Image (spheres, rainbow, N blue to C red):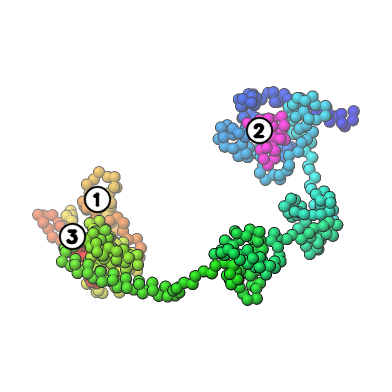
Amino acid sequence: MDDQLLNAEERSERDDAAQSDSEALPGMGVESGTFDPEAILAEIQRRYEDGSRTKPCTAKLLFEENPDLNRYYSVLNGRAREFFGRTLGKELVARGLVDKSAPKRAPQITEQADLATGMGAGASGAPVSLGDKKGFGEPPATRPASRKLTLDERRERAIADLKKYYPDGKVARLDADHKKLGERLRELYKELGYSSRQEMVKSFGFEMPDSKGGRPSTVNAEEVFEELERRYESRPVPSSITELVNENRDLARKLKTLQSRLSRGGDARGATLGKELAARGLIAEKPVKKATVRQDRVDKAEQRKIEAEQILVVLDAMEKGLAETPVEDRPLSMADLCRRFPEYEELISVGRRRGIVSKQILRERGIIGISKTALAAEKKRKRLSHPRNLELSALLERYESLGGPSFVDGEHHGELLRDGVLGFDLATMSELRETLIPIENVWPFSVGDRPAVEFTRFDPDSFSEYAGRISVSRSGDGHDERAQILPIPSHDEFLSAERFAGESPFAKEAGAQVENAFMLAGRPIAVLRYRFVIPLAKETLLYALRALGVPVGLEA
C-alpha cells in the first residue's frame, strides 16, 4: 500500500472521529443559537492541551484551523458578551487558546478544510465535520512571499500598460484617466535617470504633448484696444472692467490675459489694465475725492477731542448737581442717570463708547450711588480681606513685610506678646504658652516642686461632658500610682492633645512647677505653673501685627 493510500485512510479515520466528536457536542443549534458555548470552547481546549498544535494569534484563525467548528464562530463572536461577559477574543486569550505573541499568518485552505467544506476531490457536496483530537493533520502550507519587481521588470510593465491604455501611441490626460499609472511613471523616471516623466515616455516610443493653460499665452494688446474703441465709438463706455467684460464676452479671455500680464509688470510703464483702459477712454474714470484720507483722520481726531471736553464738562455739571443729594437718593445705574439728566443722554452714550464714562468713574465722583447688592458685596469683600479671616501663611507674609522679628520672648520684643504667651519662633513655627492649674491633692506639695503633668483627650464619640483630663503625678516620671486626675470641661488649645512634635528653642522651658501651696480646711491645695510648646497660633500673630500698627479689630 503506497503513502497516498495511507494518507487517505488516516484522513478518513480523522474525519470519522471529528464527526463523532461534533455529534457528541450538546446543543448544536447554530441557527437558533441554542448550542452550549462552553462545550465548544472545552472541545477546542482538549484539542490543544497536549501542546502538539501551535495556537494561533486570533480567534478567527483558531476556528479556521478547526473547520468542523467554524460554523459556530459568527454566533459566538456576535453574542460573546451575552455568553462570557466580554469579547470572544478576550475570552480565548484568558483561556489560553489564543497566543497574541504568535506570528501572524494568512489563513490558508488546507486539504482538510477542502474536505470539511465539501470542496475537496471526491466531495459529495455536503459539508463533512472533522475533529482531530491530537492535531489537525499536516500544518497548512504557507503562501510564498511576493517578490519585489526589479527596475527592468517595472519598466517593461509600464510600457505594457501604456500600450494597453494608449494603443495609438498618443498619451493624453494621463493623470486624469489613469492616476495610478501616472504616479508609477512619476516614480520610475527618477530611478531610470530621466529629467522628466515626459522625456521617459517619449523614450518608450510614445507621444506626450506639453500641457498648456486654457487662456492664450500671447495676446496683441493694441488689437484688443482698437476693437474696443471701435465698439464704443457711438455708445457710452462702462464704469468698470467687470462691466466691460460682461458687455464683451468674446474678448473676456484676452482681457484676462492682459490683466495678468500687466499685474506681473509686463508693461514698461508700470500701468495696470484699469489705468490703461481709463487712459484710452474705454472705462469711465472714478471721481477724485475732495478730501484726502489724512485730512479725514485729522478731522475725526479733532471731533473726538471736542466731544471729550464736552463730556468732562457734563460730568462736572452732574457732580455739582448731585452734591446736595443724599447718597441713597442718587441714581444707581446708567439708565437712572439718563432719566435724571435726559439732556446729557447722548454725550453719556458717546462717553461710554470712548471709555471716558463708566460706572466706576461715576461712582468715584459721587454721581451714582452704590446699590444694596453692591454694598453687601463690598462689605463681604472687606470682611474676607480682614486680617482675622486670613490664613496663617497670609498673616506671616504681612508680618514679615513689616519687618517683624522672627524670634520673640520676654527679653526680646516682649511688647509683641499677649497674655499667656511667653514667646514664639518663626523658624520652627512654635510658641511657648503658660497657664495656672489649681489642684486639690491628697498629699502636700512644696513650692518649687516639679510634678509631671500629662493630658489625655477623650474619644470624640464619648458620651462624657468633658473634653479630656489631666493627670498630675508627684514624681517627675509620671508613674506615681497616687496621681491626681482632673477632668477638663473645655477644649482649650493649651490642653490640646496635638502637642508640638518638632524642635523648638522653648523645649527646655516646658514643664510644670509648684507656684503656691497651702492648706485649706485641712486639705492640701497647690497651684501649678504649667508651660508647654504648641504650634504657632493665628491669635498670637494677630496680636503681634496689632502691636506693629496693623488694625485687626472688628471695627477696622
Q: Nearer the viewer, residue 13 or 31?
A: 31
CA gap, disc 1 and disc 3: 55 Å
Which residue is at 71% across, 45% downward?
A: 103
Query: Residue 93 or 166: which is nearer the viewer?
Result: 166
Q: Residue at x 40, y 75 (%)?
A: 298
Considering only vertical position in the picture, is 224 above or below 171? below
Label 2, label 1: how many angstroms apart (C-alpha)?
Answer: 71 Å
Residue at 28% across / 52% down in the picture?
456
Residue 163 in sight: no
Mark 1–mark 3 CB contact (< 8 Å) = no
Rendering quarter of residue 236: bottom right
Q: Mark 2: give few (<14), some (14-19) or many (20+) Cα within 10 Å.
A: some
**In front here: 272 or 23?**
272
Q: Which residue is mark 2?
A: 73
Q: Is residue 195 visible?
A: yes
Q: Outermost residue toward the front?
A: 234
x, y percentage for residue 452? 26, 59
Image side of residue 379 versus residue 157, left or right: left
Q: Amino acid at mark 3?
A: Asp
Mark in the foreground, 2 or 3 = 3
Residue with the mark numbered 3: 329
Write the start and end of the magenta stretch as one range.
Answer: 56-75
Task: Assess disc 3: are there few (<14), some (14-19) or many (≥20) residues with their C-alpha within 10 Å of its C-alpha.
Answer: few
* Main secondary structure of the magenta stretch: helix
Asked which secondary structure carries label 1, the reply is loop
Q: With respect to residue 132, does 540 lie above or below?
A: below
As helix, strand or loop, the secondary structure at mark 3 comes to helix
**Looking at the image, which is closer to me, 77 or 304?**
304
The residue to which callout 1 is attached is 467
Mark 2 or mark 3, which has the lower sequence index?
2
